[in-house]
Image (cartoon, rainbow, N blue to C red):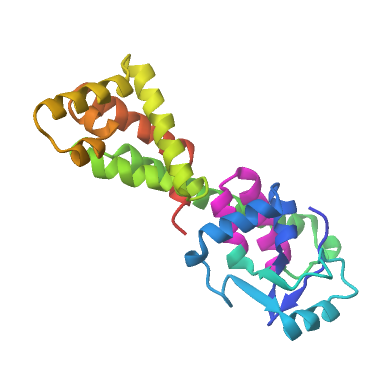
């Protein structure tokens, strides 16, 4: 990572949206979209600052001589604190984002005084290197423990209350992909397709047949319309097991333990 000159607002080191996107290997639009879909998880003054009007004008003057990606015609600006940058790393959930955040935390948000090791003995220089390595390992271990705990919790999902538990996991997966109705629908459909493949069935055909039987039994049109492929799965113990296993696999693939921040 290139050397950054620390820029502060209200005594907090901050980064712009464009900087986060560049460092995390994504686009500004993705950062903005993730924020828009998860505004309830961000607190102004804690995770970000929103600048407009005279405040924005004053900030632009303050950083006039600093190489900061700013649109001089922008009517507003978001500035991200360390906590805000951390939440964006969690939402992206990539190894690159986490690795870069570690560097930002150590070298930008909380820079340590630069020690001149040249005057230290070889033994003390070696010990300093060991301490730095242990600190990095501890951060990596903490992330690994969080991952292990998350996977263990997902694996522990049982078929006793499978409908509620799988629905909860699917909602988390959808939130990882943008938290929209479309992302939830796409996740469901991908899971249903995998159930068809592994179970050697057609949930669509079974749903049509189930609704037809319900009609013959006098079930209301509204109730038939509200019957879904999950109801089809509920009639087959084998499909329940397949469906639950697939939902777990999707949850692990999308690392949903990073979803709650």
Foreground residue among 8 and 127: 8
Q: Residue at 48% of width from left, 49% of height from top?
A: 180
Magenta segment, prevailing SS (helix, strand or loop): helix
Foreground residue among 161 and 12: 161
Please state if 44 lies on the left or on the right of 169 as rendered: right
Please state if 14 lies on the left or on the right of 180 as rendered: right
> On screen, 164 above or below 219?
below
Q: Residue at 73% of width from left, 62% of height from top?
A: 107
> On screen, 107 above or below 248?
below
Please state if 59 lies on the left or on the right of 149 as rendered: right
Q: Quadrant of residue 85?
A: bottom right
Q: x and y percent of residue 11 in the render? A: 69, 81
> On screen, 208 above or below 167?
above
> On screen, 75 above or below 31?
below
Q: Residue at 43% of width from left, 35% of height from top?
A: 250
Q: x and y percent of residue 30 in the render? A: 64, 51
Query: Looking at this rendering, what residue extends furthest in the left direction?
Result: 217
Task: Give the mark count.
Answer: 0
User: Is residue 103 one of those drawn in magenta?
Assistant: yes
Q: Quadrant of residue 164?
A: top left
The range drawn in magenta is 85-110
User: Is residue 107 one of those drawn in magenta?
Assistant: yes
Q: Residue at 57% of width from left, 55% of height from top?
A: 34
Foreground residue among 9 and 51: 51
Q: x and y percent of residue 24 in the render? A: 68, 50
Query: Looking at this rendering, what residue extends furthest in the right direction?
Result: 65
- The answer to whether residue 52 is seen in the rendering is yes
């Amino acid at each position: 990572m290139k050397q950054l000159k620390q820029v502060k607002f209200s005594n907090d080191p901050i980064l712009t949206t464009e900087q986060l996107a560049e460092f995390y290997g994504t686009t500004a639009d993705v950062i903005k979209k993730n924020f828009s879909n998860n505004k309830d998880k961000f607190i102004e003054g804690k995770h970000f600052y929103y600048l407009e009007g005279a405040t924005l004008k004053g900030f632009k003057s303050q950083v006039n001589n600093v190489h900061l990606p700013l649109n001089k015609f922008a009517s507003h600006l978001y500035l991200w604190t360390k906590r805000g940058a951390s939440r964006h790393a969690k939402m992206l959930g990539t190894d690159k984002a986490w690795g870069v955040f570690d560097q930002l935390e150590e070298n930008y948000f909380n820079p340590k005084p630069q020690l001149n090791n040249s005057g230290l003995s070889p033994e003390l220089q070696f010990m300093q290197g060991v301490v730095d390595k242990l600190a990095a390992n501890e951060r990596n271990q903490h992330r690994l423990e969080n991952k292990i705990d998350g996977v263990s919790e997902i694996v522990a999902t049982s078929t006793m209350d499978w409908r509620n538990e799988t629905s909860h996991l699917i909602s988390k997966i959808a939130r990882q992909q943008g938290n929209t109705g479309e992302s939830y629908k796409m996740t469901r459909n991908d899971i249903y397709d995998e159930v068809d493949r592994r179970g050697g069935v057609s949930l669509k055909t079974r749903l049509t047949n189930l609704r037809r039987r319900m009609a013959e039994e006098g079930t209301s049109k509204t109730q038939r319309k509200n019957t879904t492929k999950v109801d089809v799965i509920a009639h087959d113990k084998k499909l329940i097991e397949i469906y639950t296993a697939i939902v777990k696999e999707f949850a692990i693939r999308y690392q949903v333990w990073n979803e709650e921040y």
